[in-house]
Amino acid sequence: MFDGLADWLGSITWPLVTRVLASMGIGTLTYKGADTALSTAIDNVVSAANGLTGPVLQLISMAGFFDALSISAGGFSSGLAWLVLKRWVAIGAGVSAPT
């Protein structure tokens, strides 16, 4: 009796569910991948800077190189998180995702 109704509801909702799950998965993977790449890049820069001689290391430290690196990385991570969040909200509201 309800086979026709279940098929009809499934055919209506499945494309929407598929789009939402796919976009959430891609957004999460994109964010985690970029976050991991950024963390690895920061670790590599810091380890490379530790190989410098003492006076050069003190000079770039006094110039604020490490602070600038941290601020830039934080800005990039928060911008990417904001972009992923906007896409999730847009997809949840049923509108096209912003770019």
Image: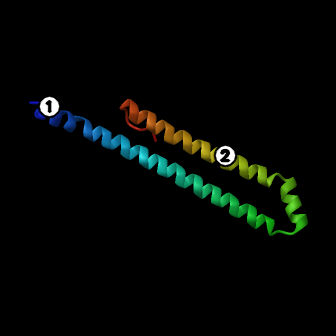
Quadrant of the image containing the N terminus: top left
Q: Secondary structure at mark 1?
A: helix
- Residue 57 lies, with reference to residue 93, above or below; the image says below
Residue 8 spot, x, y in % from top left? 16, 34
Q: Residues within 10 Å of mark 2 (few under 14, many from 20)?
A: some
- Residue 6 lies, with reference to residue 18, above or below; the image says above
Name the residue rendered at 72%, 62% in the picture.
45
Residue 97 spot, x, y in % from top left? 41, 38
Residue 52 spot, x, y in % from top left? 82, 68
Name the residue rendered at 48%, 36% in the picture.
86
Q: CA distance from mark 1 to mark 2?
A: 50 Å
Kind of residue at badge 1: Leu
Callout 1 touching callout 2 (CB < 8 Å): no
Name the residue rendered at 75%, 61% in the picture.
46
Kind of residue at badge 2: Gly
Q: Secondary structure at mark 2?
A: helix
Name the residue rendered at 89%, 66% in the picture.
54
Q: Is residue 97 left or right of residue 31?
A: left
Q: Is residue 19 left or right of residue 85?
A: left
**Which mark, by number, is residue 74?**
2
- Residue 60 lies, with reference to residue 20, above or below; the image says below
Quadrant of the image occupied by residue 24: top left
**Which mark, by number, is residue 15?**
none
Query: Hey, which residue is sitting farthest left in the picture?
Result: 1
Q: Residues within 10 Å of mark 1 (few under 14, many from 20)?
A: few
Query: Hey, which residue is sitting farthest right in the picture?
Result: 55
Q: Which of the two discs, 1 and 2, labels the residue nearer the N terminus?
A: 1
* Residue in front for this viewpoint, 93 or 97: 93
**Which mark, by number, is residue 5?**
1
Q: Is residue 30 left or right of residue 43?
A: left
Quadrant of the image occupied by residue 61: bottom right
